[in-house]
Image (tube, grey):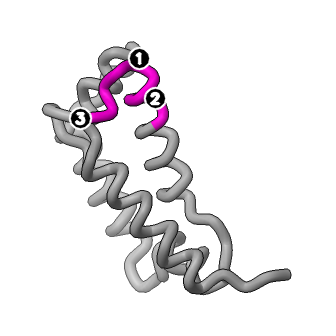
């Protein structure tokens, strides 16, 4: 989850105005509209595909590292790694 103390710093350093409240509201809105549907991350894992969140988390960590701010996103790094591990366990070669 984006918070003003970690990923928010990375966003600001890249010139992106991104507040925690805005992100939370967007997530809640998406959740309401997708009621009863499987989230895309679970669909991707079940189908053995790379996940959007894994890719996004990796990109955030990469940007933070390039700004010498990698230490500010340990939760993002961990979430991305855990999601990727789950996807790897479910990977289906084509």
- Disc 2 or disc 1, which is closer to the eye? 2
Residue 12 % position (x, y): 30, 18
Residue 55 % position (x, y): 55, 52
Give yes or no for residue 56 being in the magenta stretch.
no
Q: What residue is drawn where x is 42% and y is 58%?
A: 80
Left or right side of 2 for 43: right
Vertical order, 72 against 93 (above or below): above
Dominant SS of magenta comes to helix
In contact (CB < 8 Å): disc 2 and disc 3: no
Residue wearing tag 1? 14
Residue wearing tag 3? 72
Left or right side of 25 for 61: right
Residue 46 % position (x, y): 59, 85
Q: What residue is drawn where x is 51% and y is 67%?
A: 84
Element carrying mark 2:
helix
Span colored in magenta: 62-71
In contact (CB < 8 Å): disc 1 and disc 3: no
Residue 36 % position (x, y): 42, 85
Left or right side of 17 for 59: right
Q: Marks 2 and 1, how far apart in space?
A: 9 Å
Vertical order, 15 against 52 (above or below): above
Element carrying mark 1:
loop
Give yes or no for residue 66 being in the magenta stretch.
yes
Residue wearing tag 2? 63
Q: What residue is drawn where x is 63% and y is 65%?
A: 50
Judging depth in this view, the residue of 4 and 54 nearest the camera is 54
In contact (CB < 8 Å): disc 2 and disc 1: yes
């Amino acid at each position: 989850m984006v918070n003003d103390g970690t990923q928010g710093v990375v966003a600001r350093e890249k010139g992106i105005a991104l507040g925690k409240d805005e992100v939370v509201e967007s997530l809640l809105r998406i959740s309401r509209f997708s009621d009863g549907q499987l989230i895309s991350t679970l669909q991707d894992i079940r189908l053995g595909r790379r996940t959007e969140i894994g890719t996004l988390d990796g990109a955030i960590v990469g940007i933070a590292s390039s700004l010498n701010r990698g230490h500010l996103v340990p939760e993002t790094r961990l979430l991305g790694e855990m999601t990727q591990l789950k996807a790897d366990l479910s990977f289906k070669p084509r």
